[in-house]
Image (tube, grey):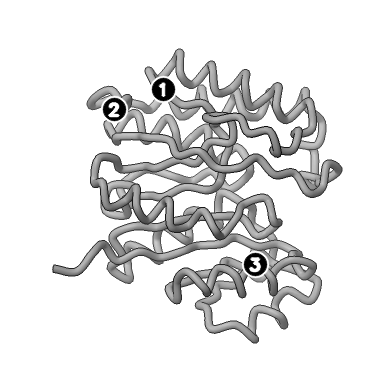
Amino acid sequence: MRGPRTLLGIPVFNEAASVDAVLTEVLGYTSEVLVIDDGSTDATPRLLASHPVEVIRHANNRGYGRSMQDMLRWAAVDGYDWLITMDCDRQHEPASIPAFTRAILDDDADVISGSRYLAECADQDAPPPDRREINSELTALLNERLNLCITDAFCGFKAYRVQNCAELRLDVDGYDFPMQFWAEAYCAGLRIRELPVRLIYTDQSRSFGGPLDDPVHRRQVYHATLEKALQRCQPEAPCCG
């Protein structure tokens, strides 16, 4: 009997400095790769063409959340059982892909979420203080409001059971996408587990590229998105496994 059919999805936006190295390493673990080019204006599109991966290109920058939605839709339409997502900025290690594959085979969760804080390691990098503070604050709020048991609300290194996640009502296009996703996962009664991944920050000055660079505004947006998602939420079962 064949194992789960799994797609590896990577959103990119102006990642010319890292995309070649990341894809070369990723392709050492899987040949089933989808890249969402979210309107890159640098050499990223040209570099992507030299790798044997599927590419969806947005004519304009649509946002991180929109790229996540596109990957889940592609995986569902193309009949994949699981979607693993990771970033292309060298903050996620392709060497962790087999750990997600092994966790998928345990068949005890619908969302396997990477956590950079589940197991602190001596060689881990320190995140920018405002990002760690907001992550901790929002993670605690999600646990309180949604009866979750997570330690890292914003890690993009995840595995999604496609059939279940494709039914979620996801329409947030920006970096506040995780707030809606966690609320929708809770409402749908999805089973969630975490997997430790290494905390890497290669660029402490990396920007969100807009108003979210202001921590006060970022908090406001995240809180507003969560409240809106909860207003339409009808939970089916607790998420903690």
**Above-or-below relation of 106 to 35:** above
Which of the 4 image quadrants contains residue 152? top right
Q: Decide: marks 1, 3 in contact (CB < 8 A)?
A: no
Q: Residue at x 55, y 75 (%)?
A: 55
Q: Decide: marks 1, 2 in contact (CB < 8 A)?
A: yes
Residue that mark 3 sits on: 22
Residue closest to the eye, 146 or 103:
103
Mark 1: secondary structure: loop
Task: Quote the CA–CA distance across marks 1 and 2.
Answer: 8 Å
Image position, residue 105 (x, y; %): 27, 52
Task: Give the mark nearer the N terminus: 1 vs 2.
Answer: 1
Q: Residue at x 52, y 32 (%)?
A: 179
Q: Which mark is residue 149?
A: 1
Image position, residue 82 (x, y; %): 34, 57
Task: Quote the CA–CA distance across marks 1 and 3.
Answer: 31 Å
Image position, residue 2 (x, y; %): 19, 69
Task: Give the mark nearer the N terminus: 3 vs 2.
Answer: 3
Task: Classify the position of the N terminus by image quarter.
Answer: bottom left
Q: Mark 2, residues whose alpha carbon is within 10 Å: few (<14), some, or many (≥20)? A: few
Q: Which mark is residue 241?
A: 2
Mark 3: secondary structure: helix
**Above-or-below relation of 54 to 154:** below
Q: Mark 3, residues whose alpha carbon is within 10 Å: few (<14), some, or many (≥20)? A: some
The three-letter amino acid code for the residue at tag 1 is Cys
Which of the 4 image quadrants contains residue 149? top left
Task: Give the mark nearer the N terminus: 1 vs 3.
Answer: 3
The three-letter amino acid code for the residue at tag 3 is Val
Q: Decide: marks 3, 2 in contact (CB < 8 A)?
A: no
**Above-or-below relation of 240 to 59:** above
Mark 2: secondary structure: loop
